[in-house]
Amino acid sequence: MEKSKKSTKRLAAAKELNKVVGEYYLECAAAKEQGKPVGWMPPMNGAIELFYAMDLQPVFPENWSPVCAAFGLTPKNFEVSEGMGYSRDLCGYLRNIVGYVNGPMTDPAIPLGGLPAPDLLISPGGGCVPVMKIFHALERRFPEAKVFKADLPQVALEEIAPHHIDYAIQEMQRLITFLEEATGRKLDQDRLQEVAALSDQACALWDEIMSYRRSIPAPFSAAEIGIMFVMVTRQGTRQAIDFLIKARDEIKERAESGTGVIENEKLRLFWDNIPLWYNMGLFNYFEKANAVVVAETYSAAWSIRLDPADPLKALALKSLMSYPLVSCVSIEKRKEMVLKACRDYAIDGVVFHRNKSCVPISLGQMDIRKALEDELGIPSVIFDADHMDARNFSTAQFQVRIDAFLEMLAERKGQTFKT
Ligand code: SF4
């Protein structure tokens, strides 16, 4: 296996994604020229819907980081941020984006036109500490940008109480006032309802798409999970719906006709934690044992629904719920979700990516591992890596560990396995 390898795409939708990604970043770059205010924000909160409802341009520095990894820009960005004193132990998204904005951002040769400078910086809180720190660093880099800060609580899903929701609604209202004053644009309530309805439809399509992966054989694997791009950057738009409908139709047809992502599926795997964005080809590595990664932690972030009749409450709930759905804000809840996915998707084994640069999602893996063994008898393997920094990943160690794991899983099912 090459050190860095793109994943093999089998879905037409996954291949079309390059076009969708290109169009989004061209739109971001064009926004400046069109006089459309540009706001940078973390993903997984209700600010995106407000932006689309007010015809503002949302930009996601965290989403730009996987793009940098795919284009091989990350080492340069790390060099810049480490030169500024940012430790290699910090989140790779943080180090990448700090390096990018203080380094190659102004290079005209940056792929996809790069990111336009922000007019607005939106930091809603509620995520992890590094994500807040990214925005502190951005405030220093772009002192002319108008800054909105909220302080949403990080609260476990099962502990979200009416006072948390009331508080989050107030913060959404404060964000609307800020955006109206900063941009001179008024929020149209009917348009907000429309956008919330589109956002809800995207979530419903997402859940439907994921449900087809329960089919045996699975119609697509984690190697094609890049389709999640539209959930991160386009939620609340017609473009997201059009893309997801096409993807859904293709995946449904494959599921109904019994067409698997590989010809001879024998083992079904769950992937915990963020993918290695610089080496998505790892998801294909399992295929030598006819194994497919059919479910993963990250997909859960979009498994929420939004009530368009009460869009402010819907966006407030989304802001409170999305991040805890994938992180260890509640280890009990995450454990429950992984175990449920393992039952629903008929998982044979779990691959834990112990992510050096993301503690919030790596916490609790030992507890989940034990519960998998004790309650479901499902074995798992742990390997050490980093979602952004290839220097913290050893291909040789990964292969040795995964080969032994696949061999053991194959033996349990009475299959033969050849390395
Ligand atoms: S959740 Fe993890 S990857 Fe995401 S910003 Fe926080 S530390 Fe980084």
Image (cartoon, rainbow, N blue to C red):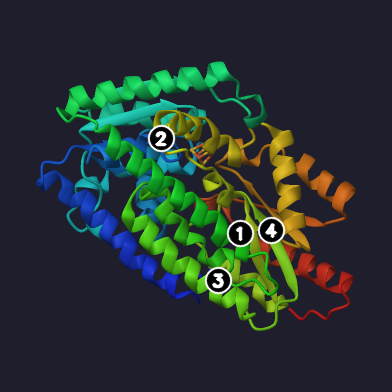
* Lower sequence index among marks 1 and 3: 3
Circle 2 SS class: loop
Q: Measure how far apart labels 3 and 2 are at the Cα level.
A: 29 Å
Name which quarter of the figure residue 266 lies in.
bottom right
Asked whether the beta carbons under mark 1 and mark 2 sit within 8 Å of each other, the answer is no
Residue 351 at what x, y percent from top left?
70, 57
* Lower sequence index among marks 4 and 3: 3
Circle 1 SS class: loop
Q: Measure how far apart labels 1 and 2 are at the Cα level.
A: 38 Å
Where 260 falls versus 348 (above or below)?
A: below
Residue holding disc 1: 394
* Lower sequence index among marks 3 and 2: 2
**Between residues 166 and 260, which one lies in front from this camera angle?**
166
* Lower sequence index among marks 1 and 2: 2
Judge from the rendering whether residue 13 lies leftward or rightward of residue 284; answer left or right.
Answer: left
State how many labels appear: 4
**Between residues 191 and 103, which one lies in front from this camera angle?**
191
Residue drawn 55% across and 62% down? 209
Q: Amino acid at mark 3?
A: Lys
Instruction: Report the mark closest to the observer, 1 or 4.
Output: 4
- Image disc number at residue 252: 3
Q: Measure how far apart labels 1 and 3 are at the Cα level.
A: 37 Å
Q: Amino acid at mark 1?
A: Ser
* Lower sequence index among marks 1 and 4: 4
Q: Amino acid at mark 2?
A: Gly
Residue holding disc 4: 270
Residue holding disc 2: 46
Circle 4 packing at 10 Å, graded few (<14), some (14-19), many (20+), is many
**Between residues 323 and 310, which one lies in front from this camera angle?**
310
Asked whether the beta carbons under mark 4 and mark 3 sit within 8 Å of each other, the answer is no
Q: Is mark 3 within 8 Å of ligand 1?
A: no
